[in-house]
Image (cartoon, grey):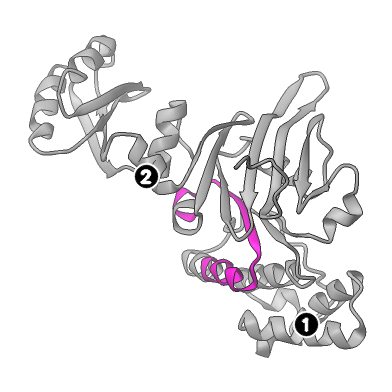
Amino acid sequence: MDERSGESHLIVDVAGLTKIYEGKQRVTAVDNIDLAVEKGELFGLLGPNGAGKTTTISICTTRARATSGTVLIAGVDVAKEPSRARLNIGVVPQYNTLDRSLTIFENLYYHCKYFGFSSKDATGRSNQLLEQFHLGERGKSYPQQLSGGLQQRVQIARAIAHRPAVLFLDEPSAGLDPQSRIAMWEAVRELRNEAITVVLTTHYMEEADELCGRVAIVDHGKVLALDSPTNLKRNLGAATVIALKLRELTGTAGLVASLEKDELVTSVEQTPEGVRIFAKAMDGLLPRLLETVQPYGLRDIAVSETSLETVFIRLTGRDLRE
């Protein structure tokens, strides 16, 4: 079945999306992106800062206009019918947008009223959300009286108050401590009980790996890979990554060729500080590597399992967190 056949299960349909900023320096923030997100998915856009993730979300949520291409949300063209599209969209932006002059209850209540709820229904929905997000005792508090993690929980509750088809989360963990981040992850997982599709952007690979059924890895406005986190890591063909920092960097091109001859090594890349080795396994490999790099003077060694960051590094040759 063609994903773009107009079937109702397709909630987010992005085709040929391009965004160019004109000025002294022409910048292509989004470069001909195609994405298809089905109902009930928890879908991630993963990439470093400046990769084009936020611009893509801004266009999908009607906050920015595309240079070319189309975005359909639940079958509605966001450029042609932005008001109608917004009925199907919930948004939690990077920065806190709670009204600090309103209580937590009022933030939820007036959001419901904005979307046409009666006073009775708005009150009922707001109280329901306070309980659902474990904020029942915080209804009369003001945002500034809550921790960052609780404020983020309120933002998510407010964003789904009008029962949208899809929730867009832009860097939802930014600024949260680890404990608050885990609590936020749990709140996002529970949205599946309401049949809400979630699209999130993040540069935390653990977050994408933990939450998302599928991930699109994005850099320089392009989708480099799109699959489940498990498949992306499996397709890399390497279970282990070994980073070697060397004292002598002259002649490392020859070193790369030597290291690649090992049967357990799938590929080797030069880095500013030495080499990065992608290996199928570690059995007996490390002693051979250390012997090969001995003439270059080993300064440090780091061994890690394959992660989404590994996939990104392999695709782009640069660190995901840059």
Q: Secondary structure at mark 2?
A: loop
Tell me the residue that label 1 is attached to. 125
Q: Is residue 298 left or right of residue 322?
A: left
Which of discs 1 and 2 lies nearer the camera? The answer is: 1
Find the residue positioned furthest to the front: 1
User: Which stretch appears magenta?
Assistant: 185-207
Q: Who's the residue at 79% across and 87% down the image?
A: 124
Residue 304, magenta (yes or no): no
Q: Viewer-proximal residue, 106 or 80? A: 80
Q: Who's the residue at 38% across and 38% down the image?
A: 310
Q: Amino acid at mark 1?
A: Arg
Residue 83: where, in percent of width, then height? Answer: 91, 55
Q: Does label 1 or label 2 sit earlier along the sequence?
A: 1
Q: How many marks?
A: 2
Residue 205, magenta (yes or no): yes
Tell me the residue that label 2 is attached to. 307
Q: Amino acid at mark 2?
A: Ser
Q: Is 246 situated above or below 202?
A: above
Q: Is residue 57 left or right of residue 47?
A: right
Q: Secondary structure at mark 1?
A: helix
